[in-house]
Image (spheres, helix red, strand yellow):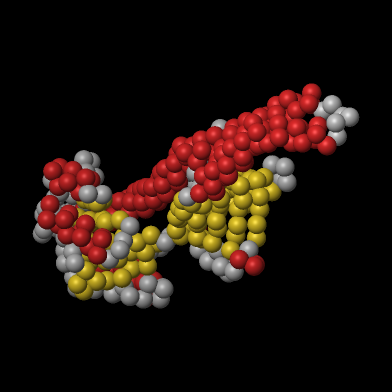
């Protein structure tokens, strides 16, 4: 693989690269208005694609978060087989002509132009025709080998701005297969990094919220009289922020008692997710999910389990079904109560993240 290090950014690494015969950009899906580039290299990193033409010093990049969909079209190379057949037929015709027709032609010319002795040249003509026939047969063999060795493949990509890109790749079938797998790995890696980034942030904020509740509920009577007003004001401010933000579908937190004893855990979770920048949809019948979060083009199905419920394997199964039913990318369970190790392992096997607020060593120490 060529060295592309001077084109890479911080914490960026090359996953794969492949040469292209041409690159076509359909801004409006109109072939007449398409932009076309030839003989470039398509490079895939853990953060983006970029097409590079070193001779023309041109470069075009596509961030992975801007890629909406990708696809592949494999074209049968019937032209290779047709070319091989044509070459074989031409070679057969030439060989037939070289064996019989040349001698007949020489005899005719000798009979008509007896004063010219051209018979000595006939063998050279035959050798020349043999040489042409050999070239045609070699060309036919190359076409057959290329049919099995190379693939004519178009890589399709659509971006958020509505543009459609078509990359006609060239190379051996194994190279194209490796690049296709690298594209899938890059998409999975991007989703995983995005999920982990959000998950860590969710976990941190919800843990801080849980620590605050724990500290508040364990204050001495003298201290407790001073805290509720501060907490009430804090939650009222969050409620106002939610009501005035674009997440208008979020229901305002209803604080019925001070001190955190009767606070609505669901409302607190909504406040936290809103502060993280998610658009939130509350589901009345979500097939196992309570909330749908949307952020950076990804969708999360969320189940919120309060302290009086223990998360079971059935809850994990329900959020898996909710994730698929609501066409979400990830499933998350926010649990205020206990979560057993077996349930955590079962959730991990099914691609479900559990944010447990009551089972981390040292959380409330």
Q: Residue furthest right?
A: 115
Q: Position of residue 187 (x, y in %)?
A: 42, 49
Residue at 51 percent of width and 35 percent of height: 145
Q: Nearer the viewer, residue 96 or 110?
A: 110
Q: Position of residue 264 (x, y in %)?
A: 20, 67
Q: Nearer the viewer, residue 250 or 83?
A: 83
Residue 164 in view in this figure: yes
Residue 24 is left or right of residue 125, and the answer is left
Residue 174 is left or right of residue 121, and the answer is left
Q: Nearer the viewer, residue 95 or 208?
A: 95
Residue at 57 percent of width and 42 percent of height: 89
Residue at 59 percent of width and 34 percent of height: 137
Residue 44 in view in this figure: no
Residue at 55 percent of width and 64 percent of height: 163
Q: How many marks?
A: 0
Q: Position of residue 208 (x, y in %)?
A: 30, 52
Picture quarter with the N terminus:
top right
Q: Is residue 131 above or below residue 357?
A: above
Residue 78 is left or right of residue 305, and the answer is right
Image quarter for residue 254?
bottom left
Picture quarter with the C terminus:
top left
Q: Residue furthest top?
A: 120
Q: Position of residue 351 (x, y in %)?
A: 26, 49
Residue 333 is left or right of residue 52, and the answer is left
Q: Is residue 320 above or below residue 244?
A: above
């Amino acid at each position: 693989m060529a060295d592309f290090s001077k084109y890479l950014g911080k914490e960026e690494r090359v996953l794969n690269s492949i040469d292209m015969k041409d690159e076509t950009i359909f801004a409006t899906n109109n072939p007449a208005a398409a932009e076309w580039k030839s003989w470039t290299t398509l490079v895939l990193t853990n953060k983006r694609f970029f097409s590079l033409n070193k001779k023309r010093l041109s470069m075009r990049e596509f961030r992975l978060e801007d890629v909406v969909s990708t696809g592949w079209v494999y074209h049968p190379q019937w032209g290779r087989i047709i070319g091989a057949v044509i070459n074989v037929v031409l070679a057969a015709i030439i060989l037939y002509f070289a064996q019989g027709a040349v001698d007949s032609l020489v005899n005719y010319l000798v009979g008509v132009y007896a004063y010219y002795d051209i018979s000595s040249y006939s063998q050279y003509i035959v050798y020349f025709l043999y040489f042409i026939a050999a070239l045609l047969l070699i060309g036919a063999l190359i076409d057959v080998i290329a049919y099995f060795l190379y693939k004519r493949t178009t890589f399709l990509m659509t971006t958020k701005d509505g543009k459609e890109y078509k990359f006609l790749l060239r190379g051996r079938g194994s190279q194209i297969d490796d690049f296709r797998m690298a594209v899938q790995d890059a998409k999975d890696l991007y989703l995983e990094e995005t999920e982990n980034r959000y998950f860590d942030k969710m976990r941190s904020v919800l843990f801080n919220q849980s620590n605050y509740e724990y500290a508040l509920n364990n204050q001495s009577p003298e201290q407790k009289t001073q805290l509720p007003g501060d907490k009430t004001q804090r939650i009222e401010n969050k409620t106002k922020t939610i009501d005035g933000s674009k997440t208008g579908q979020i229901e305002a937190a209803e604080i019925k008692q001070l001190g955190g004893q009767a606070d609505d855990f669901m409302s607190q979770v909504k406040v936290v997710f809103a502060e993280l920048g998610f658009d939130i949809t509350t589901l009345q019948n979500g097939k196992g999910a309570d909330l749908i979060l949307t952020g950076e083009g990804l969708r999360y199905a969320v189940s919120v389990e309060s302290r009086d419920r223990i998360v079971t394997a059935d809850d994990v199964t329900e959020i898996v079904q909710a994730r698929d039913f609501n066409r979400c990318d990830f499933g998350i369970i926010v649990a205020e109560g206990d979560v057993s190790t077996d349930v955590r392992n079962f959730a991990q096997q099914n691609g479900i993240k559990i944010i447990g607020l009551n089972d981390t060593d040292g959380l409330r120490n």
